[in-house]
Amino acid sequence: MPDEMSWPLIRSRGEGGASTHLEASASETGALVIGILGTGDFSRSLARRLVASGYQVVVGSRNPHRSVALFPEEAEVTSQMEAASQADLVFVAVFPEHHSTLLELKPSLAGKTLVDVSNGLRINKEGPSNAEQLADLFPESFIVKGFNTISAWTLQVGPRDGSKQVYLCSDNQKAKSLVMQVCRRMGFIPVDMGQLSSSVEIENLTLHLFPSWHIPILCTVSLFFFFYLYNFTRDILLPYITAKKSAFYKMPIKTVNVTLPSVALVMLALVYVPGLCAAFLQLWRGTKYKRFPSWLDGWLTRRKQFGLCSFLCAVLHAVYSLCLPMRKSARFTLLNKAFKQVKDGVQDSWVDEDVWRMELYLSVGIMALGLLSLLAVTSLPSVANSVNWREFSFIQSTLGYCALSMATLHTVFFGWDRAFDPAQYHFYLPPTFLLVLILPLLVLLGRLALFVPCVAQRLRQIRRGWEESRHIRFTLPDDDRRNGLEDVSNV
Ligand SMILES: Cc1cc2nc3c(=O)[nH]c(=O)nc-3n(C[C@H](O)[C@H](O)[C@H](O)COP(=O)(O)OP(=O)(O)OC[C@H]3O[C@@H](n4cnc5c(N)ncnc54)[C@H](O)[C@@H]3O)c2cc1C
Ligand SMILES: NC(=O)c1ccc[n+]([C@@H]2O[C@H](COP(=O)([O-])OP(=O)(O)OC[C@H]3O[C@@H](n4cnc5c(N)ncnc54)[C@H](OP(=O)(O)O)[C@@H]3O)[C@@H](O)[C@H]2O)c1
Ligand code: HEM
């Protein structure tokens, strides 16, 4: 415990060498003089937050008179040299291209902590990072990378309205701890990312554009184009070419509403394919300790994105479906049908089978959408964090399979016996509902195969660490509460 009585009551700014700047303890950080080089957007927001957190702030500018009015009056705006020599800890809030113009401050910054807040323009795969380059320019200072993932806006409004985590890294542990204390006092949560070599990763964090969404979105868009073109060719283009029947009015709603549910169902099946591949691969290899091929690894980690894309298409399909009877074309078709029936002397147009078919497929469709909504809600991090692993696995895996079964049943009821009607195969092209049923039915059959008791038992053993090649014998305790669909590896 440091001897507090030996500290001077009023610290003179010139006092202390390299180590004194870093040895500020948690109680002392309030007395720190914090410097900011640069008077741009980031500097102004940072100065405001630091002043609000009780720090003494000194801002260094090439032209202090021009910028002084933009800063809170508690902050001193002065020359770069003056700020660098007064401050104990300095935030470098200038673009990295201009770091070299600060070289004349080198003697004043020696032994002090410099926080590099800069971001790059494009993803840096090879390094060196901006922070590492700054460290080369100022070898006598202690460089800490951080705050670059926090926007000027978040700094201004405070952590309650924006991201709370601040990623920090440095080769100097004391310098990093000091910045962490400042960070906490400003209301942010510091996340230690290790050595300064991690700065490349921290700088790249702000430049990624939904990296795990590329493949799921590409899949969704490709499937959408495929099914749209298929339906357009089958229901609109070929009837027009062969019989001059114009049905182009179907393009905005009817064709889209056949395409969207097709994409939703195929994408939903694609969510559960990798889990099955993983299970069959583990059974075949007789161990869970061999790495999956990288394509399967990537697919397993993107199931959430596949699922959410499927959910989006399903929601749009439900909205489009509710709008189907509102269309003028639907009203004209209905009127024409009624008129024809009156002309033909048909008194009662009620067809029991059609009524049952529609009641059933709508009911299961609604249930499927309800279950998918539950899965989507649980995928929100705040909700996912409030349930334990078993509950999450039950919702995502067991209820997810129920959603897939319901959606498949919805399509089967919609198709009814029309799959066996030759009139449905216009131009030798099978109806869409038949095409989209292939994958979900295969997935459900695959899952049923995993239910076979000897297969389920073997898989459970493998996931608890049993290996065929080592012949280690053990029996699992009976657990009849588990239904076999849930992931037991993490329980
Ligand atoms: C609307 C919606 C939202 C979704 N949200 C989420 C979500 O937030 N989070 C999420 O994870 N999924 C989400 N999904 C996808 C899906 O529901 C889950 O991934 C579900 O757990 C898959 O169940 P499963 O039975 O196929 O596989 P699981 O039982 O999860 O996995 C099968 C087995 O594969 C192995 N395995 C799994 N992943 C790996 C891996 N990376 N490396 C090595 N082995 C592995 C394990 O041994 C596991 O037992 C969502 C789906 C939808 C439709
Ligand atoms: N804006 C954000 O939301 C945000 C978020 C995260 C990180 N950052 C990072 O913060 C740094 C500053 O960003 P900013 O948005 O505040 O930029 P900005 O508004 O352009 O401010 C940059 C400041 O740098 C100073 N500067 C010092 N030497 C300079 C030189 N040679 N040429 C030009 N300017 C010089 C200037 O102040 P004087 O003229 O007073 O010297 C200028 O106001 C950048 O590295 C950026 O990547 C910004
Ligand atoms: C509230 C929920 C839902 C409603 C009201 C609904 C309604 C409908 C309607 C009215 C049709 C017939 C469309 C037509 O006449 O062309 C249909 C077909 C279909 N639905 Fe749904 N649905 C719902 C949910 C779902 C879900 C969640 C999925 C899949 C994830 C799905 C997949 C399908 C498929 C594949 C078809 C057949 C498309 C075709 O080939 O014509 N539906 N649905």
Image (cartoon, helix red, strand yellow):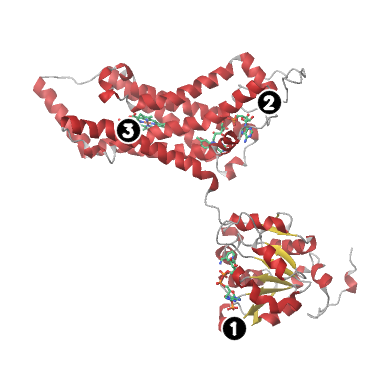
Direction from residue 464 to residue 449 in the image, left or right? left
Can you give x and y, in whole percent of width and height, for residue 118 in the image? 62, 65
Amino acid type assigned to the residue bearing label 2 in the image: Arg
Q: Which residue is mark 3?
A: 230
Q: Residue furthest left?
A: 343
Of residues 24 and 239, the one nearer the viewer is 239
Q: Nearer the viewer, mark 2 or mark 3?
A: 3
Q: Which residue is mark 1?
A: 63
Instruction: Name the image quarter holding residue 96.
Output: bottom right
Q: How many residues crowd mark 3 within 10 Å: few (<14), some (14–19), many (20+)?
A: some
Q: Quadrant of residue 234?
A: top left
Q: Amino acid at mark 3?
A: Tyr
233 or 326: nearer the viewer: 233
Residue at the (43%, 39%) spot, across then down: 220
| Mark 2 CB within 8 Å of ligand 1 | yes
Question: Mark 1 packing: few (<14 Cα in 10 Å), some, or many (20+)?
Answer: some
Q: Is mark 1 within 8 Å of ligand 2?
A: yes
Residues at marks 3 and 1, CA–CA distance in whole angstroms: 65 Å
- The first of marks 2 and 1 along the sequence is 1
Residue 316 image-quadrant placement: top left
What residue is disc 2 on? 463
